[in-house]
Amino acid sequence: MSGHSKWATIKHKKGAADAKRGKIFSRLAKEITIVVKAGGGDPGNNPSLRTLIQKAKSVNMPNDNIDRAIKKGTGELQAESYEEVSYEGYGAGGIGLVVKALTDNKNRAAAEIRNIFKKNNSDFAAQGAVSRNFERKGTILIAREGRDEDALMEIVLNAGADDMSSDDDGFEITCTPAAYNDVCAALEKAGIPTVSSECGLKAMTTTNISDATVAKAVLKFVSMLEDNDDVQDIYHNMEVDDSIADQLDE
């Protein structure tokens, strides 16, 4: 084992997501509408749409919500106009954060998100200062639950995954964005459920945090950002040391 666990933050994030399910669906709907406007409403011809539909299904977003978002993108239903913007900065312990937002008012979004940074004793960093340490990757987590590691590895590697690592909690599969849909489809065909599945930014190097106070401060920062209606995704490079994982929900 590595001595630190991504599962602790995933479980913490999942609990928070369950309490904010309506916002999760709203954010996915905005993304779906935008990629449909750019690439059309047929998932077979729009890889970005396929990726988002997979992500939506992984959080049990109703099909009606997905269909409505697609129709907004094709023009069958009226839709707002959104712009994508990003912000970068640092949290407690020097943890780097990249915030992706979709907004119909860039000035409002910048002011509100900057205010959240300031409340967490931070401010925006220069563009690229943090994001240069991230790369776009598909990342899928699967619970161990007695699963045969060799069989799982064969499935995902044959589908185009780059790598699969494991620890006591389960397996982490990584792949290129181009292979993400094929890997997800192979897992679905094999009847293997995922704990977490997304195609987004992944830190190339992580910072191990063994101080529960610091870890909680970062998670509070992330939670405050997630409460903002314009924020779509937050990426960070924190790894939580196993020694403090159980303290995060206290």
Image (cartoon, helix red, strand yellow):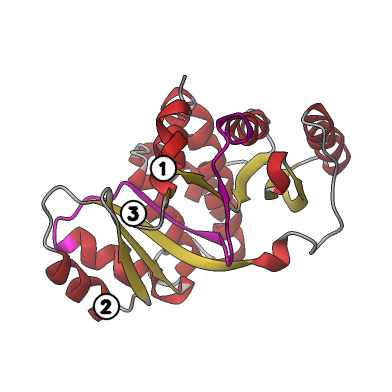
The residue at 87%/57% (across/down) is 126
The residue at 42%/61% (across/down) is 139
C-alpha gap between disc 3 and disc 1: 17 Å
C-alpha gap between disc 2 and disc 3: 15 Å
The part of the image, by quadrant, that contains residue 136 is bottom right
Considering only order in the chain, which callout, 1 or 3, is on the residue closer to the N terminus?
A: 3
| Placement of the N terminus among the 4 image quadrants | bottom left
Residue highlighted by disc 2: 157
Task: Tell me if residue 197 is in the magenta stretch.
Answer: yes
The part of the image, by quadrant, that contains residue 38 is bottom right
Labelled pair 2, 3 in contact (Cβ < 8 Å)? no
Q: Position of residue 195 (x, y in %)?
A: 31, 46
Please, is residue 127 above or below residue 143 in the view?
A: below
How many other residues sit within 10 Å of disc 3, few (<14), some (14-19) or many (≥20)? many
C-alpha gap between disc 2 and disc 1: 28 Å
State the mark number for residue 242. 1
Q: Position of residue 220 (x, y in %)?
A: 62, 28
The residue at 66%/28% (across/down) is 224
The residue at 80%/62% (across/down) is 129
| Type of the residue with mark 1 | Asp
| Type of the residue with mark 2 | Leu
Q: Position of residue 69 (x, y in %)?
A: 50, 44
State the mark number for residue 121. none
Considering only order in the chain, which callout, 1 or 2, is on the residue closer to the N terminus?
A: 2
Residue 100 in the figure: left or right of residue 157:
right
Residue highlighted by disc 3: 141
How many other residues sit within 10 Å of disc 1, few (<14), some (14-19) or many (≥20)? some
Total label count? 3
Labelled pair 2, 1 in contact (Cβ < 8 Å)? no
Considering only order in the chain, which callout, 3 or 2, is on the residue closer to the N terminus?
A: 3
Which residue is nearer to you in this view: 120 or 199? Answer: 120
What span is in magenta?
Answer: 189-215
